[in-house]
Amino acid sequence: MTDNTVTITDNRNGAHADFDILDPVVGNSCIDVRQLTSKLGLFTYDPGFQATASCRSDITYIDGDEGILRYRGYPIEQLAEHSNYLETSYLLMYGELPSAEQYQTFKTSIKNHTIVHESLMQFINGFHNDAHPMAMMVGVVGALSAFYHDSLDINDPKHRDQCAHRLLAKLPTIAALCFRHAMGQPPVYPSNELGYIENLLNMMFSFPSAEYHVSPIAARALELIFILHADHEQNASTSTVRLSSSSGANPYACIAAGITSLWGPAHGGANEAVIRMLEEINDPGEIQNYVSRAKDKDDNYRLMGFGHRIYKNHDPRATIIRKAANDLLDELETINQPLFEIAKQLERIALEDDYFVERNLYPNVDFYSGIILKALDIPLNLFTVVFAMARTAGWISQWSEMIVDQEQRIGRPRQIYTGIENRNYVDISNRGM
Ligand code: SDX
């Protein structure tokens, strides 16, 4: 037995063994249970992996109690104030903020990969106009694997880098093409004259028939949304990308798997669900009814945008987004003030209610991000697509880290079997009704 171990004793038979404690740079220490089955014949049980570390990672650190979020050690508040999405993506991917030369080279590479193969338009045109853009994104991003499958050795760092640049560059193009298809509008191709976010807004909202100038206010607000959503440790969609990639699968298909997981209303789909909830509430006098429903155990209704698996204090992104939403609505003098007012009243009422306080249910990043996206006239069913574009930087960074992690193996959890133990086959003629 040494200082940095725990001893697990099976009290049913007295068997016991020591297990190393693995210490992080900062955060919770972990029990290394990899030998648990060989030493004690036991599995661990942790549905939803609430207390399970799936990997070692240098990328993002979250402290849920203190409301801390850092990308490669940089506080999200500083990156939100001083950085931009491409620079933040470089930081997540390569571990350091780029020099001016590195940043220029990176930007040029991304610009050179924004165009998609013209055949992809046939995928997009195959969808009905009312197809949900997230369904289109899952299909079209997954289809990218058909275009690059033969030129991708995931163990070759150059191939991994090319794949990462392609995904970062092409997601906005694909998202904009899906949006234009849904609107019945002609596609707008990427322009190398524009910045990353400006290019996305131009591809979404410009028309061949008229001059279109990207609003700097809109571009900065969307840039902030992208920075804040770029990565978030081992969340459901990132864990999906890691698990599907652990078999050596094509990374384009694995990013499509991440998009699929993000779509759920308990995860990235919450930003769309928040606005639908605020629109449904519509009248501040109705807020208490919705709060009561969320508290009612016989009603599976939940307040969208509240609660978080990790943040048991404030979500630092929500704090930043709330202020940005306030400033943006003032600057744009937009008509979305009523929704924002309902959001602020809902937040106040909920946070005075013991049910929410006792369960540490605070507004998360999705609670206010939808207010900004709506103020930018981004359609509601595209909100999670924005989240997916932004999270692509995190997904490809985490994917690349996993590929080179010597400790990583194919992800293969076990179970507690609760079915019928053993029985013999019965011919159909002898079975009951
Ligand atoms: C994101 O993981 C990440 O990092 C995700 C994310 C990222 O950047 O990748 O941060 C992005 O997904 C943010 C979360 C967006 N989702 C929502 O806003 C949907 C609403 N929130 C919930 O569904 C829920 O809070 C989760 C899914 C976010 C967290 O669920 P947990 O940690 O599994 O919490 P839980 O379901 O165990 O709930 C604990 C208690 C329960 O009550 P009791 O059984 O203890 O009585 O809190 C209650 C829940 O009923 N509860 C809520 C609630 N969320 C939890 N009650 C009302 N409204 C809610 N929103």
Image (cartoon, helix red, strand yellow):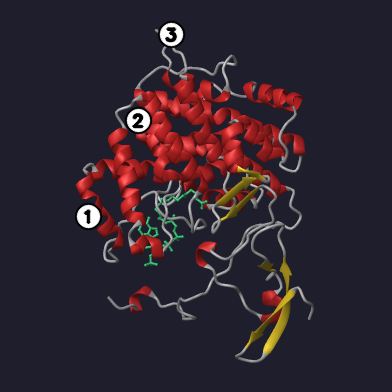
Secondary structure under tag 3 reads: loop
Residue 214 located left or right of residue 167: left
In-front residue for pair 53/257: 53
Residue sitting at 31 percent across and 33 percent down? 337
| Cα–Cα gap, marks 2 and 1 | 37 Å
Badge 1 crowding class, 10 Å Cα cut-off, few under 14, some 14 to 19, many 20 or more, is few
Q: Which mark is residue 346?
A: none
Q: Amino acid at mark 2?
A: His
Q: Quadrant of residue 109?
A: top right
Quick check: can you spot residue 179? yes
Q: Quadrant of ligand 1?
A: bottom left
Q: Position of residue 419 (x, y in %)?
A: 46, 76
Secondary structure under tag 1 reads: helix
Q: Disc 3 designates what residue?
A: 211
Badge 3 crowding class, 10 Å Cα cut-off, few under 14, some 14 to 19, many 20 or more, is few
Foreground label between 3 and 2: 3
Q: Which residue lies most toward the right here? A: 2
Q: Amino acid at mark 1?
A: Asn
| Cα–Cα gap, marks 3 and 2 | 29 Å
In-front residue for pair 313/136: 313
